[in-house]
Image (tube, helix red, strand yellow):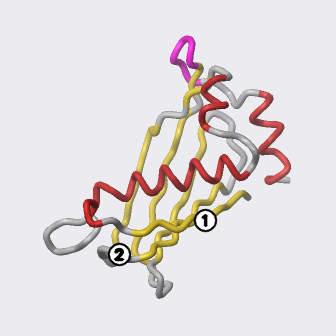
Amino acid sequence: MLSSEIKIRVRYGEVDRMGYLHHGNYPLYFEEGRTELIRSVGLSYREIEDRGILLPVMDMHIRYIVPAKYDDLLTVKTLLRKMPRVRLEFEYTVENQEGELLCEAKTTLVIVNAENRKPARIPPFFDEILRPYFI
């Protein structure tokens, strides 16, 4: 299992008239969480793409529980529970500075060959880096 967490402060431009974080901004936070999780194992999205692999989002499920508000300091926890083969299935939780659960989500990304844009198995370099976390 592989996990990471990041802190994000809700900015004024991300909230609606009620002062709540607009629901459309949560996926951006999840993307930051994924990016940092990948970075934590010594890779970057750029390096993965430069090696001919794309990781488009195939599916996303979000459950909003309590709204985040302007200036809240959020903790986005990202988890990859199982070793990827053709898909990466990420889970997320978002909590405010009081530790209150605001949101839960899951995304599925597909490993795609950049050249032919078809699904592909996890390439050896990526498999080698991730495998120790799932033994």
Where disc 2 sits, the SS reads loop
Q: Does 10 appear in magenta?
A: no
Q: Residue 67: percent from the left, percent from the top?
A: 30, 75
Q: Residue 98: percent from the left, percent from the top?
A: 47, 87
Q: Taking 22 as reference, is 101 left or right?
A: right
Q: At x 80% / y 53%, what residue is drawn?
A: 133
The total number of labels drawn is 2
Q: At x 45% / y 61%, what residue is drawn?
A: 105
Q: At x 67% / y 48%, what residue is drawn?
A: 39
**Residue reaching furthest to the left:** 17
Where disc 1 sits, the SS reads strand
How busy is the neighbourhood of tag 1: few (under 14 within 10 Å), some, or many (20 plus)? some
Q: Amino acid at mark 1?
A: Glu
**Residue situated in front as seen by the camera: 24 or 110:** 24
How busy is the neighbourhood of tag 2: few (under 14 within 10 Å), some, or many (20 plus)? some
**Residue situated in front as seen by the camera: 46 or 106:** 46
User: What's the distance in space between the residues labelled 2 and 1, CA to CA?
Assistant: 18 Å
Q: Start and end of the magenta stretch?
A: 114-119
**Residue reaching furthest to the bottom:** 98
Q: Does 118 appear in magenta?
A: yes
Report the magenta stretch's main SS.
loop
Q: Residue 88: percent from the left, percent from the top?
A: 60, 43
Q: Amino acid at mark 2?
A: Asp
**Which numbered circle lies on residue 71?**
2
Compared with residue 41, is residue 3 higher up or lower down, i.e. above or below? Answer: below
**Which numbered circle lies on residue 5?**
1
Q: Residue 74: percent from the left, percent from the top?
A: 46, 72
